[in-house]
Image (spheres, grey):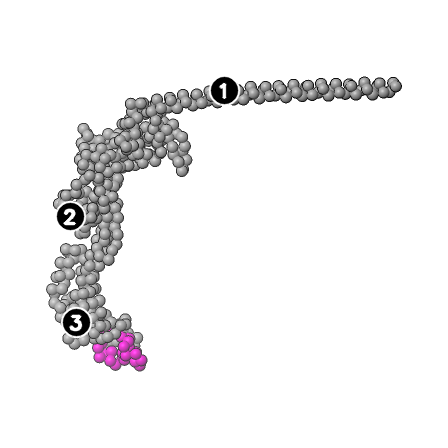
Amino acid sequence: MIKIGTALFEACEELERERGISKDVLIASLCDAMVAAYKKHMHVKEAANIEAILDEQTGEIGVFSTKLVVKEVEDPELQISLEEAQEIDDEVEIDDEVKIEVTPDQFGRIAAQSAKQVITQRIRDAERNNILNEFLEKKGTLTTGIIQRVENRNVIVNIGKTDAIMPQREQIPREYYKPGNRIRVFVLNVKETNRLPQVIVSHAHAEIVRELFELEVPEIEDGIVEIKSISREAGFRTKIAVWSNDPEVDSVGACIGPRGSRIQTIVGELKNEKIDIVRWSPDPVEYIVNAISPARVISVDIMTDDEETKDALVVVPDDQLSLAIGREGQNVRLAHRLTGWKIDIKSLSQMEDEEAARNANNYEYEEEVEEERAVDSDEIQEEIEEEMNQQAYDEEDIQVEEVEEETSEEE
C-alpha cells in the first residue's frame, strides 16, 4: 500500500465546494489512474481482475488482483490454490474470491505521474459535464451576464461558469455592447464540444419579451393573463397578444400596470423599444383589427381561410393607410407574424376606385354582349330569309315541272 495522507481528501472536498465536482468522482479517478499506471508498468494491456482500493481511514492506496480459489490452478493470473488463499484469509473456501495486493515496489512516483494526468482530465470532463447539464436546464430561459469583449462581431458574455457567444444575428441593431456592462440574454442553444460547452445566447429573441412580462406582471405568472403570441423586430418594435382567463381582469390593463409602471419598466429594459399590447380574440376579424392598431379599421374581409393559406383584406380610412402599413411595412409585417394571417391593406379611396373600375368594366362588357347579340340576331334573320327564298324557288321549279309533264301527256 502507498501512503498518501489526508491532503488528497482535503483537496477533493475543496474542489467539490468550488467547482461542484463530486469527491467520489475524484477518488474514482485516482483509482483508475493507479490501475492504468500498473498496466503500463507491468506491460500488460488487459487485466480485468486488477483494481485499486483506497482506504480513507488510513489514507493508503494499493493495487489488488482478484483471484478465484480452486483445487488445481490452471491459470495463475486468475486463480489461486486453496492453501495459498488460506494464508491470506483462513476462512476462504473453494469458489470464493480473494484480493491479493500486487502493488509494485517503488511504484509511488510512477503512480503519481499517471494519477496527475488522469485526474486533471477527469476534472475537466466533470467540469464540462456539470456546465453542460446546468445550461441544458437553462436552455430556453432568461439569464443575466456580463459583457467580456467583442470578437469578430460576436459579443462574448460571461454567464457564470462559462462564456457564452452572442452572434451578430442575435444582437440588437445599432446597440453598443460595452465590456463590463450587465446584460439580460436568452439562452438559445447549448452545443457540446471537446472543451467547455459552447453556449449561444440572444439579445434579440422574442422570448426575452415574454420573460420580462412574466417577471413584471404577476397575473401572467399566476396564469390569469396568458401571452398568446409575440412578434418582434428587436430594437424597433414588438407586438404582444394577451388574453385574460378571468372576465374581471383586463389583460391589456394588467400588462400596462398602474400609471404604466409595468410597461415602462419593460420598455426601459429593452432600451426604449416600442411595445404594442394587443388583446387576443378567437374571432379572426376582431383579432386582425386589434393587431393593426393603432390604426383605425373600416372593415376586414376574410378572403381564404384554410390550413395552407389565411388571407384577409383590411380597409382603412385614407389618412390611416400609412399608419396601418407602418414605416417600411413594419406594422403590417408584425401584425402578420402575430396573427398568422396574410394581411392586404387598402385605403377607402383605393377600394372605391377599384369598385368604379370594376363597374365600368362590367358596363363595357354588357355593351359588347348586347352588340354581339344584335349581330347574331341580324345573321339569324338573314339566314331565315335565305332559307325562305330558297324554299320559294324550289316550289316554283316543282310547279314548272308539273306543267311540262301535263302538256306532254295531252299531246
Q: Which mark is residue 261?
A: none
Q: Nearer the viewer, mark 3 or mark 2?
A: 2
Q: Nearer the viewer, residue 308 or 323?
A: 323
Look at the picture and state if 21 lies above or below 328: below
Q: Nearer the viewer, mark 3 or mark 1?
A: 1
Identify the element where label 3 is drawn. Answer: helix
Identify the element where label 1 is drawn. Answer: helix
Task: From the top left corner, tell me how far across and down residue 59 is, in percent.
Answer: 14, 68
Q: Which mark is residue 110?
A: 3
**Upstream in sequence: badge 3 or badge 1:** 3
Amino acid marked by disc 3: Ile
- For the point 30% across and 78% down, the residue is 75
State the extent of the magenta-drawn residues as a range: 62-89
Look at the picture and state if 328 lies above or below 105: above
Does residue 245 appear left or right of residue 160 in this picture? right
Task: From the top left corner, tell me how far across and down residue 406 is, in percent.
Answer: 84, 19
Extreme right residue here? 411
Q: Quarter holding the N terminus?
A: bottom left
Identify the element where label 2 is drawn. Answer: strand
Report the residue marked by disc 2.
Answer: 148
Judge the density around disc 2: few (<14), some (14-19), many (≥20) Cα neighbours within 10 Å.
some
Q: Label 3 vs label 2: CA separation? A: 42 Å
Report the residue marked by disc 1.
Answer: 367
Does residue 284 appear left or right of residue 207 in this picture? right
